[in-house]
Amino acid sequence: MINRDLIRLKVVQLIYAYYQNEDRPLNVVMQELDYSLQKAHELYLFLLTTLAEIRELAEKHVEVHLQHNQRLGIRVEAPLPDQYIAENKFLQQLSDNDALIEYREKRKQEWDDEEVLVKNTLKTITDSEILAIYIENGVFDYEADRELVRKLYKAFVMNNEEYDTLLEEHGIYWNDDKEIIDSFVIKTIKRFEPENGRSQELLPAFSNEEDQDFAHKLFKEVIARGEETRGLIRDNCKNWEFNRLAFMDIIITQIAITEIMIFPNIPISVSFNEYLDIAKVYSTPKSSSYINGLLDHIVKKLKEEQIILKN
């Protein structure tokens, strides 16, 4: 699950923090890198858990409503909107998923604000036009149910300020990770198949050992080559003194140069694009274009010196 986009972001964050306090032992910072990546996977499981909890709350609402009507002798033919969520075939499979149940049993803490968030999300869903259209279409098979959840997640969980606030309060890494993790949740929804039942595989923390090695090697090499890469930045600054550069711009450029130099199988264009995207989010409005020009100038010189032999 943890891909190189997320790894690069984590390395930028932790290299930035490292240079704020260089007295910290490198092995401690490496442990923090591993921990932050582990927390990213926990966020993925947490967001899937939230979907399961929304279904379970809808189920409780339906039970309470039916019991109330039975006591009063009321017979209602039309189902509640909550019932379509409670009986959603994809959400039922997700609630029963063995791997998610294991995570939920380990994660015993319950946050009051999380309960409120689940209630608010369910209310938004049951009042939504998306659910109304689904009900009107009258197709309630597995495929339609899975597609409904995908649409609801994109509409009411992604870019939801309530989720951002909760994550900021309870996980120092989570708020920055959520945009990437949201894409993994959507990917998981699409991957579910009814025939897999409870044993449907969720995304693992790392898809392969190579990505985990990439994280460790990139982080260590950025520190080890710090003087060299900063020297390259200092010598190639155009119309701008090195000490006037935004500190985050230096960090992003330093990491990008390191990656380009030490990973021969990663195309230069990939490294450029990934770090320019990070700069657009984490640095100044003009940083992306400036870093692009600076990196281009440095890479051309390194190619001329045959230090870099790839395209």
Image: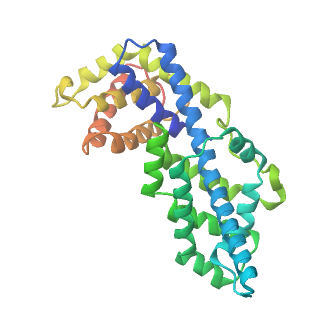
Residue 127 x %, y % = 53, 75
Residue 272 falls in which quadrant of the image? top left
Q: Is residue 106 left or right of residue 300?
A: right
Residue 121 x %, y % = 54, 63
- Is residue 12 in view? yes
Q: Residue at x 42, y 31 (%)?
A: 12
24 or 296: nearer the viewer: 24
Residue 243 x %, y % = 19, 23
Q: Is residue 3 left or right of residue 103?
A: left
Q: Residue at x 48, y 53 (%)?
A: 163
Count of labels shown?
Answer: 0
- Is residue 144 in view? no
282 or 294: nearer the viewer: 282
Q: Quadrant of the N terminus?
A: top right
103 or 251: nearer the viewer: 103
Seen in the picture, residue 73 relative to 189 is either above or below; the reply is below
Q: Residue at x 45, y 11 (%)?
A: 25
